[in-house]
Image (cartoon, helix red, strand yellow):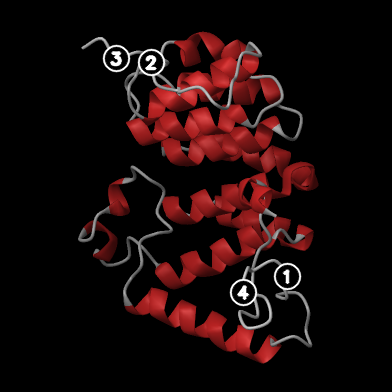
Amino acid sequence: MQARFFQPKPFEEFYDLEADPDEVNNIADEPDEGAAVLSAMRRALDDHLLAINDNGFIPKGCALEGYLASRQPGRYPLGQVIAVAERAASGREGEVPDLVRDLGSDNEVIRYWAATGLLIRASDAASAVGAMLDALEAESTPQVRVVLTEGLAHVGHTDLGVAELASLLSDDQPEMVRLQALNALTWLDDPSPAMPMVERLVDDRGYLGRAATYLARVQDETFDPSASLLPPWNG
């Protein structure tokens, strides 16, 4: 049960805390088990997100992330973002054409969630490969490029995906973009072409160093879960 935390999660989770205080039995998909309550809570959450202009949908490191930036008129259409994020996270195969359409948005947050939705679907997004390649060529936001390339790596374009993710590890990229690229590489079957760039980061004493060290040790089969991922301190 604890291992579920580290595995792909369902779109929604809903628990009867009186009968199931340890939150083991997810009843979100059981229509006879509190469906009305779940629907009401879903609406309440969306209303709250809109009321506070929640900027948690903005990719880390984007210029929109700040309080004032996310409140500039037209820059962060949260109602539309919520709808695209719901479409993305649902995992429904029938949503692929809509996600492809959303890739063409002029808003980077919407494009990010559209790309995320295609990544979530993995091989089920194969019909969108052409659109994803076109979107990558046109995309200027690095956070969106990370997601697009990871998605392409899962639909037959591994070499392109690894090469692009390796380039996003360069020193001229923001730390959050480099961390996102490292995380993406960790989920690929063969990130070996990117390992020279990864290994340049293992001495970093922050998140980058830990993520890079983990990936490097997994690749060379020396990962020890009980060992520290931090380099020895000699400062």
Q: Is residue 7 left or right of residue 194?
A: right
- Residue occupied by mark 3: 233
Disc number for residue 25: 1
Q: Quadrant of residue 49?
A: bottom left
Q: CA distance from mark 4 to mark 3?
A: 43 Å
- Residue occupied by mark 4: 21
Q: Say what secondary structure mark 1 lies in.
A: loop
- Residue occupied by mark 2: 231
Q: Residue at (61%, 34%) from the top-left corner?
A: 150
| Label 4 or label 2, whichever comes before in sequence order | 4
Q: Say what secondary structure mark 3 lies in.
A: loop
**Callout 2 touching callout 3 (CB < 8 Å):** yes
In depth, the one of 210 and 55 nearer the eye is 210
Q: Residue at (51%, 8%) from the top-left corner?
A: 196
Q: Residues within 10 Å of mark 1 (few under 14, many from 20)?
A: some
Which amino acid, by three-letter code, is at mark 3?
Trp
**Callout 2 touching callout 1 (CB < 8 Å):** no
Q: CA distance from mark 2 to mark 1?
A: 41 Å
Q: Residues within 10 Å of mark 3 (few under 14, many from 20)?
A: few
| Label 3 or label 1, whichever comes before in sequence order | 1
Q: Quadrant of the C terminus?
A: top left
Q: Is residue 6 left or right of residue 112?
A: right
Q: Quadrant of residue 53?
A: bottom left
Q: Position of residue 182 (x, y in %)?
A: 50, 28
**Callout 4 touching callout 2 (CB < 8 Å):** no
In depth, the one of 47 and 111 nearer the eye is 47
Q: Residue at (64%, 40%) from the top-left corner?
A: 132
Q: CA distance from mark 2 to mark 3?
A: 6 Å
Judge whether 167 appears above or below 75 on screen. Answer: above
| Label 2 or label 1, whichever comes before in sequence order | 1
| Label 4 or label 3, whichever comes before in sequence order | 4
